Image (cartoon, helix red, strand yellow):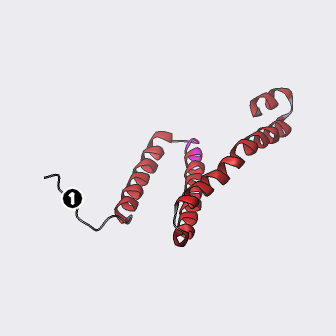
């Protein structure tokens, strides 16, 4: 819509209409993505689930803005560095995630 708006002189109104359509589509998805995990978690873990959901949503938004900023120049090198740092962060978080402390059952 913003491209159409630039060609016809409707730049800002077209962008606002596009954002409105996006908000109408993503608004209900945001609430269901919160209610779903909360309903599956025990009552005493709902705060943890909620904060983890909002933290990952914020992290995803920050990474998206950072990746869009990389498009300005030296994209391949900066994207490689960002991807490497993201992989290291994901590996570190996976290693720190709580897991089962019991040994795995043997198949024998």
**In terms of image quadrants, where is residue 22?**
top right
- Residue 106 is situated, as x and y percent measured from the top left of the image, at 17, 56
State the residue in front, 51 or 84.
51
Q: Quadrant of the N terminus?
A: top right
Relative horizontal placement of residue 3, taking residue 46 as reference (left or right): right
- Residue 36 is situated, as x and y percent measured from the top left of the image, at 58, 54
Residue drawn at 76 percent across, 43 percent down: 24
Relative horizontal placement of residue 14, taking residue 62 as reference (left or right): right
State the residue in front, 83 or 57.
57
The number of numbered discs placed on residues in the rendered structure image is: 1
Residue holding disc 1: 105
- Residue 48 is situated, as x and y percent measured from the top left of the image, at 53, 68
Up/down of 3 relative to 72, above or below: above
- Residue 49 is situated, as x and y percent measured from the top left of the image, at 54, 64
Residue at far front of view: 108
Relative horizontal placement of residue 63, taking residue 32 as reference (left or right): left
State the residue in front, 87 or 11.
87
Residue at far bottom of view: 44
Residue drawn at 59 percent across, 47 percent down: 69
Was residue 26 drawn as part of the magenta stretch in this picture? no
| Badge 1 density bin: few <14, some 14–19, many ≥20, Cα 10 Å | few
Relative horizontal placement of residue 60, taking residue 87 as reference (left or right): right
Up/down of 97 relative to 64, above or below: below
Q: In the rendered structure, which segment of residues is drawn in magenta? A: 68-73
Residue drawn at 67 percent across, 54 percent down: 31
> At numbered mark 1, what does the secondary structure look like: helix, strand or loop?
loop
């Amino acid at each position: 819509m913003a491209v159409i708006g630039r060609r016809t002189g409707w730049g800002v109104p077209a962008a606002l209409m596009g954002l409105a359509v996006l908000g109408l589509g993503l608004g209900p998805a945001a609430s269901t993505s919160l209610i779903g995990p909360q309903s599956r978690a025990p009552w005493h873990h709902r705060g943890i689930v909620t904060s983890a959901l909002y933290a990952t949503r914020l992290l995803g938004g920050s990474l998206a803005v950072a990746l869009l900023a990389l498009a300005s120049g030296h994209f391949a090198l900066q994207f490689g560095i960002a991807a490497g740092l993201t992989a290291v962060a994901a590996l570190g978080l996976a290693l720190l995630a709580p897991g089962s402390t019991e040994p795995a059952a043997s198949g024998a």
